[in-house]
Image (cartoon, rainbow, N blue to C red):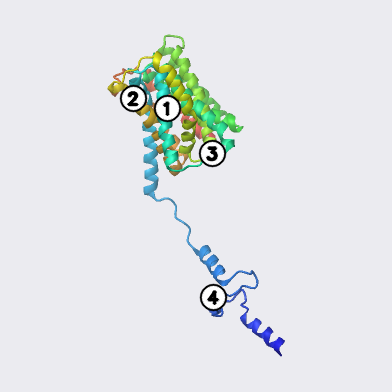
Amino acid sequence: MRAHDSATERQGIAVPPSASPADRPATGHPATDTATGRTGTAAATATRATARPQAPQAAPVSRRVGTLQAALGVTAFSLTFPSTAWGLEGIGPWSFVALRCVLSALVAGACLLALRVPPPRRADWPGLAVVAAGTVIGFPLLTTLALQTSSTAHAAVVVGLLPLTTAVFSVLRTGARPSRAFWAAALAGAAAVVGFAVQQSGGALTTADLYLFGALVVCAAGYTEGGRLARHMPGWQVIGWALVLCLPLGVLWAALALPHESFALTAHSTAGLLYAAIGSQFLGLVVWYRGMAVIGIPKASQLQLAQPLLTLVWSVFLLGEALTPAAPLTAVAVLVCIAATQRARG
C-alpha cells in the first residue's frame, strides 16, 4: 500500500509537458517538466523570451544622424590638404608630419586609455602595422612633400582616385574576380587622372605627381587592411591603435627633424597642424566610422564621392587658388568612374 500510495503521490505531483502554468501544483519548489527536465520557472522564462517582440529596425532619426556623421567625416577629410598647406607656411614638411603623428597618437592613446580598451590580439598587430605605414606615415608624408610644389586643387584631383585605387586593392586582397566593366571603369579613371597631371605639368609628370601616385598606393593598402580588421574591431580602434603604434617613431622623427627645418607657429601653421592632427587624422575618422556603421558602406561611399570637389572649393576660399577648367571636369570624370566601379561590384 505504501508503495502504491507513493507512486500515486508521485503521479499527482508530476505535470505533463502540455499542462498550462495554472494547472501546475502550488508547491514551495518549481514544478518539473518531466519531458525536458526544465523547471516551470525556466520554461516560463523561455516562453516569455521567445514571445518577446523583435527589436525594431533603426528609426529614421538614427539613419539621419548616421548620414550626418558620415558627411561630417567626408568634410573633415576634404580639409586635410588646405590645412597641410597652412601648416607648411611655418613648419618644414618632415617636422609637420612628425608632429602631426605625435599629436594624433597622444589623443588616440588618451581615448583608448580612458575607455579602457584592451589591446588587440597578437594576430592583428601585423595588419595594424600596414594601416600605420599607409595611413599614418606614408600618405601624410607623401602628400605633404607633394604640396610643397603642387597646388591643393591639383593634389585633390589626383588623390580623388583613392576610392577607386582602394577598390582595386580590395579585389586583389580578397581574390575576387570583378567584371570587365569594373576594370574598364578603373582604367578610365586612372587615364583621366594621368592625363590631367600631364596636361597641368606641361607634358610630363612632376616629382609632386609621383609623390601623389605613391600616396595613392600606400593609402589604398592601409585602407584595405583597415577594412579587413574592422570586421572584428571597431573602426576607430583600428586607427587608434595604428596611431599609438607610430608614437615612438613619431617622437624620434620629430627630434631629428625639428633642428634642421624651419619652425614658426604662426596663426595659419598652428591651425593647420592642429587640424591635420586632431580634426582630420583622428576625429574625422571617428565620425566617419560611426556614420558608416549606421548607414552602411555603400551609402557612405556615395557620400565620399563629394570629397575631391569639396577640396577644390576649400582651395579657392581658404587659399585663394585659381581653378583651371580641367580641374573640376577631371574630378567629375573620376567620380563617374568610381561610381561605375561600385555598380560593377554590386
Asked if residue 6 lies left or right of residue 55, the reply is right
Q: What's the CA distance linking mark 3 and mark 4?
A: 49 Å
Please give the name of the residue rendered at 34% of the width and 23% of the height, measured from the top-left corner: 82
Which amino acid type is shown beneath numbered disc 1? Answer: Val
Q: Mark 4 points at which residue?
A: 21
Q: How far apart are the two marked residues, 1 and 2, measured between alpha carbons? A: 15 Å
Dot label at residue 272:
2
Tell me the SS state at disc 3. Answer: loop
Tell me the mark number nearer the camera, choosing from 3 and 4: 3
Task: Determine which of the numbered discs, if any, sits on residue 120 in the image.
Answer: 3
The first of marks 4 and 1 along the sequence is 4
Q: Quadrant of the N terminus?
A: bottom right
Q: Which residue is drawn at 42% across and 22% down?
A: 97
The numbered mark at residue 115 is none
Q: Which amino acid does label 4 sit on?
A: Pro
Instruction: Report the residue marked by disc 1.
Output: 102
Other-residue count near label 1 (Cα within 10 Å), few / some / many at <14 / 14–19 / ≥20: many
